[in-house]
């Protein structure tokens, strides 16, 4: 079988990842530094740039288990999720990963999945809602998409993007606090408040989301293509994407100001995906290509993977901007 992405394309993908990292850090860094300059002059700029540098260095190195704990996720129970572990193991073998990623279940009825870590030590998180809505065949397509991100080295860029979004989220809350705290003095004319700086800080998370959206389209298309290559079943991922679109709504419903009123609470990683219709169209075109033999899966009745009822798994908001 000839891989859908050859070595030259993988090298181009790696170079694009490095460029995307630079653009993401540069774009968010400029917005943050300019806002800090308006509020605190050059001292604020130095503090902001130092904070971004620390995130850029250490965010990709965070242990993946810490991310899972943020969402109160639990390792999947082999006695209940043996089929899922088998699928992940088979996909990891086909992807030639150095280690099989661990699988965690997030106690939330939203439909979501994401990977974090490094190819040597990666973790895939899937929500209980995803397990209940998708068939095992569709779930295999989603898992293959996430493992493609692992193989292509996308996770460091994603971790950086998510950490930057969290950082700007904290700054947006700071802007709200400063505005409220200084409002009486401003009304009395006792303080010259730089409202442009406060506004930029408040809008920084939305600006960051737009940057992620602009930088991620090719990366997501590649992961779809390689996911189909790994499973040998592009229609399964297309079907899963169709369900996600119908149950979850669109990106624009999630591109809101940083307050907990969104209909689609989810990690910021999933706000970066291109239009679902185009992704499905490209996947269905792959059915005429030479692919791996489909992974044999047998459907079994689904039970709760986390030991709690759906009623107690409503989406909840945690500072700074973490939904689970």
Image (spheres, rainbow, N blue to C red):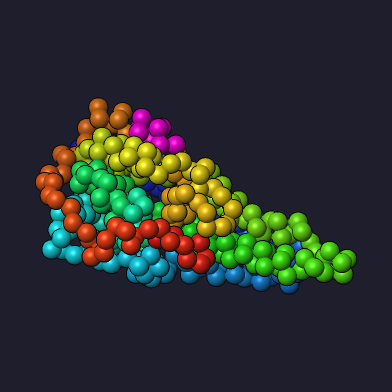
Q: Residue furthest front?
A: 311
Q: Quadrant of residue 315?
A: bottom left
With 4 as the anchor, is 26 left or right in this view? right
Q: How many callouts does the rendering have?
A: 0
Q: Residue furthest right?
A: 189
* Residue 280 located within the stretch drawn in magenta: yes
Q: Nearer the viewer, residue 47 or 97?
A: 47
Residue drawn at the location 25% of the way across and 45% of the way down: 134
User: Can you see residue 314?
Assistant: yes
Q: Main secondary structure of the magenta part?
A: helix
Q: Nearer the viewer, residue 241 or 258?
A: 258
Residue drawn at the location 82% of the way across and 65% of the way down: 186
Residue drawn at the location 29% of the way across and 57% of the way down: 310
User: Can you see residue 9?
Assistant: no
Q: Position of residue 145 (x, y in %)?
A: 31, 47
Q: Position of residue 241 (x, y in %)?
A: 34, 40
Q: Position of residue 144 (x, y in %)?
A: 27, 48
Q: Which residues are magenta?
A: 275-282
* Residue 7 located within the stretch drawn in magenta: no
Q: Quadrant of residue 284?
A: top left
Q: Quadrant of residue 61?
A: bottom left
Q: Quadrant of the N terminus?
A: top left
Q: Nearer the viewer, residue 149 or 123?
A: 123
From this view, report whether residue 308 is shown above or below residue 277: below
Q: Quadrant of the C terminus?
A: bottom left
Residue drawn at the location 71% of the way across and 60% of the way down: 198
Q: Position of residue 316 (x, y in %)?
A: 43, 61
């Amino acid at each position: 079988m000839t891989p859908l992405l050859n070595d030259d394309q993988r090298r181009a993908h790696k170079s694009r990842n490095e460029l995307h990292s630079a653009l993401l850090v540069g774009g968010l860094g400029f917005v943050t530094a300019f806002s800090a300059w308006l509020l605190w002059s050059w001292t604020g700029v130095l503090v902001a740039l130092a904070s971004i540098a620390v995130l850029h260095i250490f965010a990709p190195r965070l242990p993946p288990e810490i991310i899972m704990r943020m969402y109160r996720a639990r390792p999947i129970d082999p006695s209940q999720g043996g089929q899922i572990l088998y699928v992940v193991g088979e996909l990891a073998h086909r992807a030639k990963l150095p280690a099989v990623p661990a699988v965690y279940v997030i106690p939330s009825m939203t439909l979501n999945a994401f990977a974090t870590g490094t190819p040597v030590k990666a973790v895939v998180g899937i929500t209980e809602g995803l397990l209940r809505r998708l068939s095992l065949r569709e779930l295999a397509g989603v898992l293959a998409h996430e493992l493609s991100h692992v193989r292509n080295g996308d996770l460091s860029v994603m971790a950086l993007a998510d950490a930057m979004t969290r950082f700007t989220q904290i700054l947006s809350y700071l802007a709200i606090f400063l505005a409220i705290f200084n409002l009486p003095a401003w009304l009395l004319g006792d303080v010259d408040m730089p409202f442009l700086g406060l506004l930029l800080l408040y809008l920084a998370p939305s600006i960051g989301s737009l940057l992620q959206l602009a930088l991620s389209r090719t990366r997501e298309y590649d992961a779809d293509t390689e996911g189909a290559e790994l499973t040998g079943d592009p229609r399964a991922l297309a079907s899963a994407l169709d369900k996600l679109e119908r149950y979850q709504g669109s990106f624009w419903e999630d591109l809101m100001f940083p307050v907990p009123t969104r209909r689609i609470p989810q990690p910021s990683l999933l706000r970066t995906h291109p239009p679902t219709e185009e992704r499905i169209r490209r996947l269905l075109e792959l059915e005429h290509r030479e692919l791996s033999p489909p992974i044999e899966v047998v459907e079994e009745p689904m039970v709760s993977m986390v030991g709690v009822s759906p009623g107690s798994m409503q989406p909840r908001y945690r500072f700074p901007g973490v939904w689970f």
